[in-house]
């Protein structure tokens, strides 16, 4: 009301009034496009949203066709801003950015050259792919990529990695207790000089 009382918002020389229009995409791909239609029919000139990556992915095509910008504050799927739409923006890093940054640091700053990758079962592949691609593009070697189902699998996986002479292990898991157990198991097996690079999300 305060902004509208002073003339609204100037977008490219055209004044616009602000109006709250809510359309729930339900973190659902199909509903994302439907919600986009609702907002455009209401005359929206810019969109704040959508919340989830799956909804944003389908909605962005609708906005692009209408020439309306979409700014998502929370959609972290890497592919969202890799589809070529010039109207799609995000204000949060994507799920693979932390892994890529970590790989860059380990390779260029820490000087580590041989990395194994271990993921807890059912994890997103984005962080693994971004880490591996970045590490190898900088001249590093991925010695292996393994999946573990529980802490019971740690010893066998680490024994195999120990034989590969990896100097860093990229471990992906959202559970800090399990990540700590992984590190402790490696230490107890005599791998105290091997860096454990833990990524919690993505």
Image (spheres, helix red, strand yellow):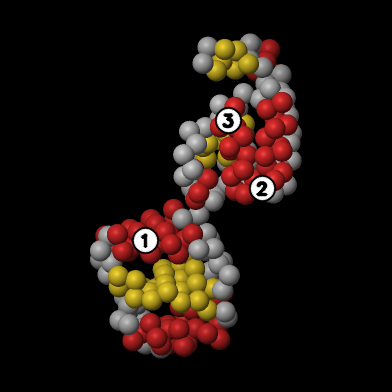
Q: Residue 29 carries which label?
A: 2
Q: Are marks 3 and 1 in contact (CB under 8 Å)?
A: no
Residue 65: mark? 3
Image point (54%, 51%), residue name: 77
Q: Marks 2 and 3, Cα distance to the nearest angstrom?
A: 17 Å
Which numbered disc, 3 or 1, marks the residue closer to the eye? 3
Task: Pick whichever of labels 2 and 3 is earlier in the sequence.
Answer: 2
Q: In this view, does 73 lie above or below 198?
A: above
Is the Cβ of the residue at disc 2 closer than 8 Å to that at disc 1?
no
Q: Quarter-wise, where is residue 66 in the image?
A: top right
Q: Circle 1 — which element?
A: helix
Label 1: which residue?
133
Residue 79 position within the rendered picture, expressed as x and y whole percent measured from the top left: 50, 49
Q: Is mark 3 on a helix, strand or loop?
A: helix
Of 2 and 53, nearer the camera is: 53
* Residue 86: percent from left, percent from top: 48, 33
Residue at 49% across, 43% down: 83
- Residue 4 seen in render: yes
Q: Distance between the residues labelled 2 and 1?
A: 28 Å
Label at residue 185? none
Q: How crowded is mark 2: few (under 14 residues within 10 Å), some or many (20 or more)?
A: some
């Amino acid at each position: 009301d305060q902004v509208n009382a002073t003339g609204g918002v100037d977008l490219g020389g055209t004044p616009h009034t602000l109006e709250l229009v809510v359309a729930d995409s339900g973190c659902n791909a199909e509903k994302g496009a439907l919600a986009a239609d609702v907002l455009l029919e209401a005359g929206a000139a810019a969109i704040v949203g959508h919340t989830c990556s799956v909804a944003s992915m389908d909605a962005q095509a609708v906005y692009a066709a209408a020439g309306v910008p979409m700014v998502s504050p929370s959609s972290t799927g890497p592919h969202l801003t890799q589809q070529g739409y010039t109207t799609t923006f995000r204000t949060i890093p994507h799920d693979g950015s932390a892994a890529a940054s970590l790989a860059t640091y380990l390779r260029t700053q820490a000087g580590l050259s041989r990395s194994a990758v271990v993921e807890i079962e059912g994890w997103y592949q984005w962080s693994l792919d971004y880490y591996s691609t970045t590490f190898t593009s900088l001249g590093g070697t991925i010695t292996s990529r393994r999946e573990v189902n529980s802490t019971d699998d740690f010893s066998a996986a680490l024994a195999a990695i120990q034989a590969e002479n990896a100097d860093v292990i990229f471990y992906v898991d959202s559970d800090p207790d399990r990540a700590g157990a992984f590190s402790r198991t490696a230490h107890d097996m005599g791998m105290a000089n091997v860096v454990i690079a833990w990524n919690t999300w993505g």
